Amino acid sequence: MKDLYSEYSHRRYNILTGEWVQVSPHRTKRPWQGKVEDVLQVQRPEYDPNCYLCPGNTRANGEVNPQYTSTFAFQNDFAAIQEDLEPFQVEDGFLRGKSERGICRVLCFSPRHDLTLPRMSLLEIEAVVRLWKEQYAELGAIPYVNHVQIFENKGEIMGCSNPHPHGQVWAQESIPVESHKKGTQQLAYFQKKESSLLQDYLQQELGLGERILFENEHFVVVVPFWAVWPFETMLAPKQSVPNLKSLNQIQITAFAEALQWLTIRYDNLFETSFPYSTGIHQAPTDGQEHPEWHWHMSFYPPLLRSATVKKFMVGYEMFANPQRDITPEQAAGRLRSLSGVHYLG
Ligand code: H2U
């Protein structure tokens, strides 16, 4: 099958969403005369007096950040989902809507303005993992919260508003679309096989090896067979676990190792602070056990050919389904071949 996949246009099935991606490996040699983004190689200070997220600074709404020394979470001053509202539901013919209640927080990964995950020590990354675990547990325990979405937008190109290392968490009453698709697929498989869809998939990938980037005792990093973005990856525990809550210290270190491995390779790929959106999909926090759910972290990076040429999800992607040229196997090969030493030393 490998030769067919590397030679001919084909579709691949995403077992987690039930969606398809078009792969066009024969197109990788086409000329490029499209948009070239400006490369931003800015030297940042450790502390920026004008940054809303640095310790001791005043935020846009007048609140002052504490002199935090590790991670720091605060209520988003411009929360997209409101906590204080009167619930409503409107059904007016074809016009359906309902109120959505939730909590949005900003998660600062470090007091240092100039760091990013790949530039942090293992211990510093572990603190970020612990923060994610705590936030999921704390927000998920709120009775009306049924879903907790942790994510990071990294880089201006991804719409990140501030280079200070940070992510976000949105906790809400509904199950959002992406999570709902993945929950449905995992549940259908679990009911049929009494086994975890993702765990069984990872077993197959580990057996084949060609899309595996990294593994340690507890975690695996893979370019999914159905990856949409050119250098999309997935980081997941080898054993099926519904969420981060049960992570012990050994697993936190193993998770941090996987994150460090991957983000250093990402930066080294085009010798730039590699932009991406990453998110952790975990089981709903609706009081049920969800044995079908296997948490995982997906990385969706937009860059295609260099620090300046990105993949656009337009045209066919908007109107039909996603399409890619470079195959997931080629992407995995390139990421595996990179140095483990960050290009900035
Ligand atoms: P992004 O960089 O991913 O946009 O996240 C930054 C978030 O920080 C953004 O959602 C919030 C914005 O609303 N923010 C505050 O809560 N307070 C501030 O003083 C500035 C930015």
Image (cartoon, helix red, strand yellow):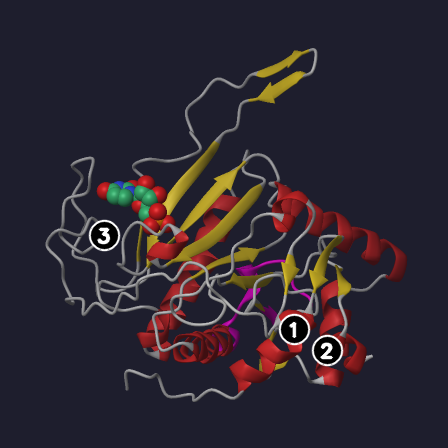
Amino acid type, mark 1:
Thr
Distance (Cα) linking label 2 and label 3: 45 Å
- Residue to which mark 2 is pinned: 6
Which dot, 1 or 3, sits closer to the camera? 1
Circle number at residue 327: 1
Residues under numbered marks 1 and 2 in contact, where contact means CB atoms less than 8 Å apart: yes
Distance (Cα) linking label 1 and label 2: 7 Å
- Which residue does the image show at 62% across and 79% down from the upper left? 330
Q: Quadrant of ligand 1?
A: top left
Q: Give the image quarter of residue 306.
A: bottom left
Residues under numbered marks 2 and 3 in contact, where contact means CB atoms less than 8 Å apart: no
Q: Give the image quarter of residue 13.
A: bottom right
Q: Residues within 10 Å of mark 2 (few under 14, many from 20)?
A: some
Amino acid type, mark 2:
Ser
- Residue to which mark 3 is pinned: 53
- Which residue does the image show at 38% across and 71% down from the upper left? 125
Q: Is mark 3 within 8 Å of ligand 1?
A: yes
Range drawn in magenta: 234-251
Q: Give the image quarter of residue 196.
A: bottom right
Q: Is residue 215 above or below residue 281?
A: below
SS at mark 2 in the image: helix
Q: Please indicate whether residue 99 sits to the left or right of residue 263 in the image.
A: right
Amino acid type, mark 3:
Leu
The residue lying toward the viewer, choosing from 121 and 299, is 299
Q: Is mark 2 within 8 Å of ligand 1?
A: no
The residue lying toward the viewer, choosing from 20 and 64, is 20
- Which residue does the image show at 76% across and 59% down from the upper left? 15
SS at mark 3 in the image: loop
Q: Please indicate whether residue 317 sits to the left or right of residue 263 in the image.
A: right
Q: Please indicate whether residue 251 sits to the left or right of residue 199 in the image.
A: left
